[in-house]
């Protein structure tokens, strides 16, 4: 009787162990599914933030990032935001800033999309450069900004140097078009002022004749 009871107890323990392992497998599967969904969302977000310009890099031509590239992209963006936003708002803890800068630079070396993103962000939003470089009171943040931008340029240069000449031509052409538009506006303004003066003179002559 005792042996039978012991056998029943062993079977119950075995069934409970199987049940508990199955219960642990369900949350693990759910976690894996959530991680896959988060990675897919990161891919979509990262791909949407990449501008389509002339370049030899695939993501510059609108090719979506892979899951690994998207994760690296988001990690590096978080590190940059943490350094430039958190450390800029407090003078305490700045002793850890050099370690964070070195870590973010290492992330930039492994993520060309992030290098392109930070350069594009500072190019399209000049207030970022003003806020983190010219007006920031923390010396470490100003040094970190220069370090990030120069390192991003260094990482991208081997892949985009061949397109610098074309980008320069586009820039000069747009600058020339802006100058032509400004000159045309000034010429039209002068004609308008001249016409207004002639009209006022005619009105004065008519009043004097009357």
Image: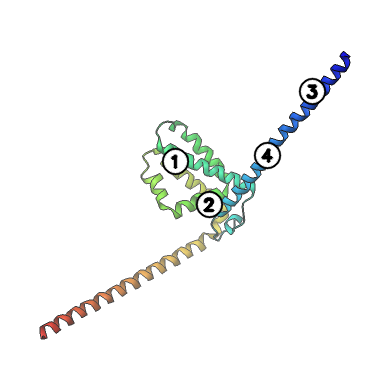
Question: Can you tell which of label 2 and label 4 is closer to the viewer?
Answer: 4
In the picture of the structure, the residue carrying the numbered disc 2 is: 116
Q: Quadrant of residue 208?
A: bottom left
In the picture of the structure, the residue carrying the numbered disc 4 is: 30
Dot 4 or dot 1, earlier in sequence: 4
In the picture of the structure, the residue carrying the numbered disc 3 is: 13
Dot 3 or dot 1, earlier in sequence: 3
Secondary-structure class at tag 4: helix
Quick check: 45 left or right of 208?
right
Dots 3, 4 in contact, CB < 8 A: no
Local packing at callout 3 (Cα closer than 10 Å; few below 14, some 14-19, many 20+) is few
* Residue beneath the point at 39% across and 38% down: 139
Local packing at callout 1 (Cα closer than 10 Å; few below 14, some 14-19, many 20+) is few
Dots 4, 1 in contact, CB < 8 A: no
Local packing at callout 4 (Cα closer than 10 Å; few below 14, some 14-19, many 20+) is few
Question: Can you tell which of label 3 and label 4 is closer to the viewer?
Answer: 3
């Amino acid at each position: 009787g005792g042996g039978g009871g012991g056998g029943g107890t062993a079977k119950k323990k075995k069934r409970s162990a199987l049940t508990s392992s199955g219960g642990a497998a369900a949350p693990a599967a759910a976690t894996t599914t959530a991680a896959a969904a988060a990675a897919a969302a990161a891919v979509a977000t990262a791909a949407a933030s990449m501008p389509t310009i002339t370049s030899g890099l695939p993501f510059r031509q609108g090719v979506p990032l892979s899951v690994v590239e998207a994760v690296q992209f988001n990690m590096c963006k978080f590190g940059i935001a943490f350094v430039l936003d958190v450390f800029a708002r407090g003078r305490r803890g700045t002793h850890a800033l050099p370690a964070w800068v070195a870590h973010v630079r290492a992330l930039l070396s492994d993520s060309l999309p992030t290098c392109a993103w930070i350069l594009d962000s500072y190019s399209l939003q000049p207030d970022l450069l003003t806020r983190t470089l010219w007006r920031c009171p923390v010396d470490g943040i100003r040094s970190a900004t220069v370090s990030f931008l120069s390192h991003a340029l260094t990482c991208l240069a081997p892949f985009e140097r061949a397109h610098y000449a074309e980008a320069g031509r586009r820039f000069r052409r747009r600058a020339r078009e802006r100058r032509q538009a400004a000159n045309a506006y000034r010429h039209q303004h002068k004609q308008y002022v001249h016409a207004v003066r002639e009209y006022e003179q005619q009105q004065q002559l008519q009043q004097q004749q009357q």
